[in-house]
Amino acid sequence: MFKTARMRKIRIVTLDKYVTPIVDVLHEQGLVQISDISDSIQQDPELAELVTPAKATPYSGKLSS
């Protein structure tokens, strides 16, 4: 029997070259829900100084749906 578990928010910061492999593994394992933070970056100046959003690809749209 399955027990539900409380979700926790995590942030993963990585180099561009590791984004696709990380997303692939996490998606295949069904371990996380992936959210786009582009809007958050634009609204928070401190966060905008630290990170820049990656460009959206058709692949990322497919994963988020």
Image (cartoon, rainbow, N blue to C red):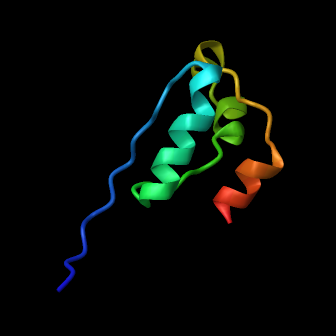
* Image: 49 above or below 60: above
Position in image of residue 33 (x %, y %) = 50, 57
Q: Residue at x 64, y 22 (%)?
A: 16
Q: Is 10 on the left or on the right of 48, as rendered?
A: left
Q: Is 12 on the left or on the right of 35, as rendered?
A: left
Q: How many marks?
A: 0
Residue 7 picture quarter: bottom left
Q: Residue at x 73, y 59 (%)?
A: 62
Q: Residue at x 71, y 38 (%)?
A: 38
Residue 2 picture quarter: bottom left
Q: Quadrant of the C terminus?
A: bottom right
Q: Observer-nearest residue: 47 or 51?
A: 51
Q: Is 55 on the left or on the right of 5, as rendered?
A: right
Q: Which residue appears farthest toward the top when viewing the image?
A: 49
Q: Quadrant of the N terminus?
A: bottom left
Position in image of residue 32 (x %, y %) = 44, 54
Q: Residue at x 63, y 21 (%)?
A: 17
Q: Which residue appears farthest toward the bottom when viewing the image?
A: 1
Q: Observer-nearest residue: 10 or 48?
A: 10
Position in image of residue 59 (x %, y %) = 75, 50
Position in image of residue 34 (x %, y %) = 55, 51
Q: Is 37 on the left or on the right of 9, as rendered?
A: right
* Image: 41 above or below 39: above
